[in-house]
Amino acid sequence: MRTFEEKLKFYRLTSEEYQKAKNSLGRDLLDIEWPLFSALWSEHCSYKSSKIHLRKFSYRNQNTPNLEGENAGVVDLGFGERIAFKMESHNHPSFIEPVQGAATGVGGILRDIFTMGARPIALANYLCFGQESAPRMDDLQKGVVHGISMYGNCVGVPTITGQTQYQSQYNQNILVNAMAVGYFAPEQKMARARAGGVGNWVVYVGAKTGRDGVHGASMASASFDEDTESKKPNVQIGDPYYEKLLIEACLEVLSKDLVVAMQDMGAAGLTSSSFEMASHGQVGLEIDLQKVPLRDPSMTPEEILLSESQERMLLICRPEHFPEIQKIFSRWNLDSTCLGTVREKRQVVLKWGSETLTTIDPDLIVEKAPRYERPYEKWVSAQQVASPSEVNWNLFNTTAKARPLNWIYNQYDQRVGTRTARDCADPIGMVQLDHSKRGLAVAVGCRADLMKMDARLGALDAIYYPSFQMALSGAKVMAVTDCLNFGNPQKVRIMSEFVASVEALAQAAEELDAPVISGNVSFYNETLEQNIISTPATGLVGLRADVENLIPSRFVNPFESVILVKYAWAATNAFWAHQKNQSARFYLNAEAKPAEFILSCVGLERKIFEKSISVSSLRSVSLGGVATTVQKMSDQGIVFKAHPQTVEADLYKDELYQFVLTTSNEQETIEFLQDYFSEMSPFLSIQVVGQTTQGA
Amino acid sequence: MAKKVGVIRFLGTNCDFDILKWVQNKGQNSEFIWHEDQFNTQDFEALILPGGFSYGDYLRCGALAARSPVMKSVNEFAKQGKPVLGICNGFQILCEAGLLPGALIRNDSLRFKDEWAQLRVVNQKSYFGEKLNPDQKIQLPIAHGDGRFYADAETFKKIQDQNCVWLKYEKNPNGSMADIAGVTNAQGNVFGLMPHPERAQFSWMGSTDGDFFL
């Protein structure tokens, strides 16, 4: 028997939280209630440290209906088409067991999408690893990539874009964020996550419940210590084959209108799915835990409630529809079992056969979870702000190369679905929408080098930069999802960076008219007091009129002029300071309006095509400057040669935002660009920096 | 009457809709056939076994699918000399079912590989291969973890003697024996290839060379 103190520690509740739970119940917690509060009041499930700040993402437009309490955000694209999308972290499990941790991250985010009735059409990922020399790092990165590849490829959803970074601050806490995009064809209905209809059945479908992932949610809400090995049983095991069957079966019952509500059993498994569905639907549920299909019949009620076994869903249906649901699931080789019923009285009754384990108001656990306003300070840009003359450009050398990441992307199936128009080799991904044949652009963002220097600048860039990359491919950003990876929120510095990041993301989203409509917060990315770089990763979707005539992002022809277009908002040596292990500095032009420049770029590509301007390739300039970018553009032996007048060091400057293009008609293109961007001067400059040539 | 192509769906097939759309885009009728069902061979002019991960690649790629009820009809269909095409996992299934020679084993890199591959046509065959000319170069994407073609010495000799080599990689991506990317049976009516022609239908996909197959 554990003492009271030991229980608090085991279930990761503070004594204040215990008091709060006790007061709301009017009595002490029963043994079976400890795990319920532990899971649903964990940071992971309750967002207790972040919720008051996430309200800053309230901006919406006519394309983004407010869907509080649903599994993912939805964007109305017109022509009857809608998409659901979301991004989620699986950092802690991936560090403990990289293959399964990353694989189940992909599985979980896919379920959030198809549980709404949308067919998943694209995946993206955002990965941060430590230095290659760090312990286990080689195995970690290979394992994570293998896990994503194994899962995504098998379920038949293409991975079309991603971002991978390496920094020492992730040595002991890697980041694995996965994004999924689902498609609703016209007429296709959206499924809800709220239980309803007194007397309706609560049905369990999918894989059987095992002991894997028990206490996973509360594990993901704590910092790491030296002992990660012993946490392996907290990591779930995924089977993409089951997921594929589950996708088909769930979409089939949803399309036949057999289901009232559906919810994935994700973090905190059956506990969170049942309590949240009841709370959102303002009804009660009665569930018999003895009816849950088990892998091991000796599992206890507590283990059943907290298991995070993968590929399971909970759905609500009318009793008369159950036989047909069962028939469809069995055709797909999946179990479906009725666990109980929907009750009018707003209580969740957990039973073990005829014995009642507990009767509890779901709102007490879901809606009345603790909310913390953790202390933070107002954001002041750090002392690194400098005038252009102070920025030490001499740090630059000319030998560094862009790190080749092909070994990662080549392991992802990028074309299954036959919608892919832009793959991982391009700066953004793009798929064709089935009905309207328009292009749906997908990109992820957040550059750790910039975050390390200034959280506000970095978070603005986390939306600006991918929007800019999309704009250069003719796509306008429509909406944003985020995955806010931060350290320990009980530390003032971390909380201050969190608040500054949220405010910056909200600002950029409003400026670009691209609401932040879904997301995830991952705190406690901390190991032995060492916090990660604050990393508000973003996932963006954008729209293009079609998928035809996209300008290549790599060199096509030799002996053409390379033109650099620059909008002067910020200049930094962040990337190179990182290479040299020196502190970064930046210069910010407060008058500049980067969002206006980005929006003005959206029509550029179309105009080039309409006016038949001879542009053969075009690409945004990444960190590492023009030099790194032209290296990425090199293709089929065609390489960049600097103009004799070009100052070499200038090619390595990181300036936000710039793009390069190649043309066979320098004069005409420059005149066209001057005219096109006439409203952007005085911040704009256009110059020829070199030419393409046939390499050795 | 327009031709009707049967598209076989196993549990875990994931290119099923891609193939259905591809055939329809080419102006032909197509229809799914469920793995548990048997069908009348007169109902279809041709069959396609799409790619994917049938039965989660458990045991061996294609091994479980090759033993499902629908394969009895597929066998009969093939024995009648009617055209059958297996793409990627479909190719693996046809090898496991003994309808095509050889086997497909783990890539030499031991990794899944997704990339564009340049292919060379070795033999022209009727139906799925009739638009291809010998020595023609085409561009198709590959996406597989187990695409390395292998045959024992005796089988390999037979494959060559009977002109069963259909397509070869210009640059071998997976360690395939003799750079083989696709084969046919000796009669020339059963086809298998690892690359995905359905992923090369429009120029925005990166190539239109998939057109040669339908």
Image (spheres, coloured by chain):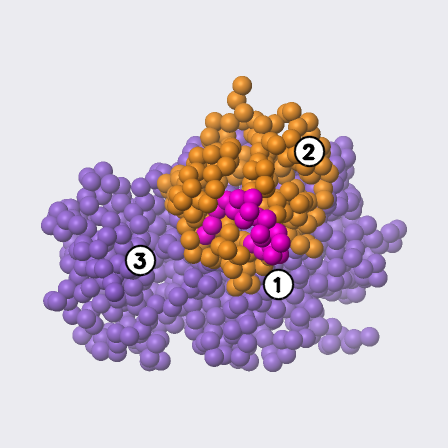
Chain colours: A purple, B orange
The label number, if any, that marks residue A100 in the structure image: 1
Disc number lying in front (2 or 3): 2
Q: Amino acid at mark 2?
A: Glu
Residue that appears at 43% across and 38% down:
B132
Of callouts 3 and 1, which one flags the residue occurring earlier in the amino acid sequence?
1
Pointer 2 and pointer 3 on the same chain:
no
Q: Nearer the viewer, residue A390 or A275?
A: A390
Label total for image: 3
Q: Amino acid at mark 3?
A: Asp
**From mark 1 to mark 2, how far is it between C-alphas?**
42 Å
Q: Mark 3 — residue?
A: A635
Tag 2: Cα neighbours inside 10 Å, few (<14), some, or many (≥20)? some
Q: Which residues are magenta?
A: B149-169
Is residue B203 positioned above or below A645 on the image?
above
Tag 1: Cα neighbours inside 10 Å, few (<14), some, or many (≥20)? many
Is residue A324 positioned above or below A51 on the image?
above
For numbered disc 2, what is the local secondary structure?
helix
